[in-house]
Image (cartoon, helix red, strand yellow):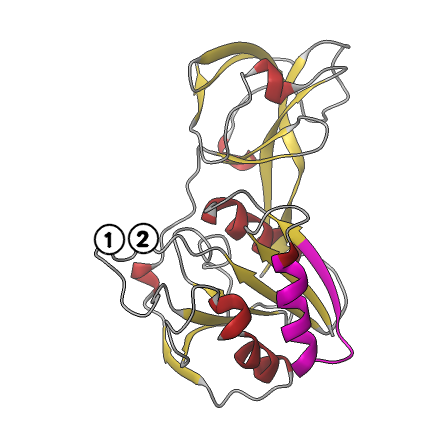
């Protein structure tokens, strides 16, 4: 079993080690890969659930995710209660277990073959992903579906936004949630992009490296997937020989990206 553990604990946070230990108690031979997203960033969580889950990988896979801002109810919490645990089954057989919060399920919503509540406590610990949820994840990884409850109402799962910063990679490239098929431009056409208060000229490219050094490219990026015969690619901002993230003043994930003209 290969497990992708996606959470907002922070890079190098011992919380990852604690959760890994609990998962290995129920899935002793698992290989676990860690991915840290920014605090409370359900958008980045949902983006990577889809990017990892819908693309090729080991046949026996589980994605276990936790990003729970506890914004489903703004009143005082009883017993550390938060958003509920859910199960999704993707078309390629990948199992997804994690909290339904914000955009965590938005990117897989159009493709999931099953989306169900998992009947476990919504409270009981400040650290539910360590203390409450791992036994349920292990049961599902081992094909025990006895904890599954009612189907999720798709209308209550937010659609993925089509105009946001989704991720900043290690080179400063800005991955967006703008679907490439919605951009109707000819190669080398000039375009103006706004992120926050920063506006920059860019060149539309059908391949990022087909622009001169120092040019900001707006092009279909490396992220996307094919599921149910539907291909999705996401637009990316790439500054050849530089850093697009710095060009735009180091924007945060989930900031709006606007194409002007």
| Residue 29 lies within the magenta run | yes
Q: Residues within 10 Å of mark 2 (few under 14, many from 20)?
A: few
Question: What percent of the width, then of the height, locates residue 124?
Answer: 39, 74
Query: Residue 54: in sight, yes or no?
Result: no
Nearer to me, 164 or 204: 164
Q: Is the magenta stretch mostly helix, strand or loop?
A: helix
Nearer to me, 159 or 118: 118
Question: Residue 245: which numbered mark, if any?
Answer: none
Where is the C terminus found, in terms of image quarters? top left
Residue 150 image-quadrant placement: bottom left
Q: In this view, does 147 lie above or below 82?
A: below
Question: What percent of the width, then of the height, locates residue 184?
Answer: 52, 25
Q: Write down the region rendered in magenta.
A: 15-34
Q: In this view, does 184 lie above or below 225?
A: above
Question: Residue 74: which numbered mark, if any?
Answer: 1
Question: What percent of the width, then of the height, locates residue 14?
Answer: 65, 56
Residue 73 image-quadrant placement: bottom left
Q: In this view, does 12 lie above or below 83?
A: above
Q: Residue furthest left?
A: 75
* Residue found 41% across the figure and 41% down from its top: 161
Q: Mark 2 points at which residue?
A: 71
Q: Report if the CB atoms under discs 2 and 1 are less than 8 Å apart.
A: yes
Q: How far apart, in angstroms, are the residues tagged by discs 2 and 1?
A: 6 Å
């Amino acid at each position: 079993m290969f497990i992708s553990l996606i959470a907002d604990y922070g890079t190098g946070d011992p919380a990852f080690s604690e959760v890994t230990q609990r998962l290995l108690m129920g899935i002793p031979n698992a290989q676990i890969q860690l991915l840290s997203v920014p605090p409370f960033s359900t958008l980045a969580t949902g983006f990577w659930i889809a990017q990892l889950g819908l693309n090729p990988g080991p046949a026996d896979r589980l994605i276990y995710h936790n990003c729970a801002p506890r914004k489903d109810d703004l009143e005082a919490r009883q017993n550390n209660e938060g958003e509920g645990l859910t199960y999704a089954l993707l078309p390629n057989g990948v199992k997804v277990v994690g909290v339904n919060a914000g955009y965590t399920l938005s990117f897989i919503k159009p493709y999931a073959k099953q989306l169900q509540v998992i009947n476990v406590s919504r409270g009981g610990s400040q650290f539910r992903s360590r203390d409450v949820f791992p036994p349920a994840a292990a049961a599902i990884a081992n094909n025990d579906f006895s904890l599954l409850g009612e189907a999720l109402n798709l209308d209550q799962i937010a659609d993925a936004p089509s105009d946001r910063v989704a991720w900043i990679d290690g080179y400063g490239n800005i991955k967006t949630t703008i679907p490439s098929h919605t951009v109707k431009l000819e190669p080398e056409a000039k375009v103006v992009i706004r992120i926050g208060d920063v506006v920059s000229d860019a060149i539309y490219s059908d391949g990022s490296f087909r622009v001169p050094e120092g040019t900001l490219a707006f092009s279909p990026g490396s992220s996307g997937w094919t599921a149910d015969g539907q291909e999705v690619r996401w637009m990316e901002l790439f500054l050849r020989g530089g850093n697009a993230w710095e060009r735009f003043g180091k924007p945060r994930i989930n900031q709006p990206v606007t194409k002007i003209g």
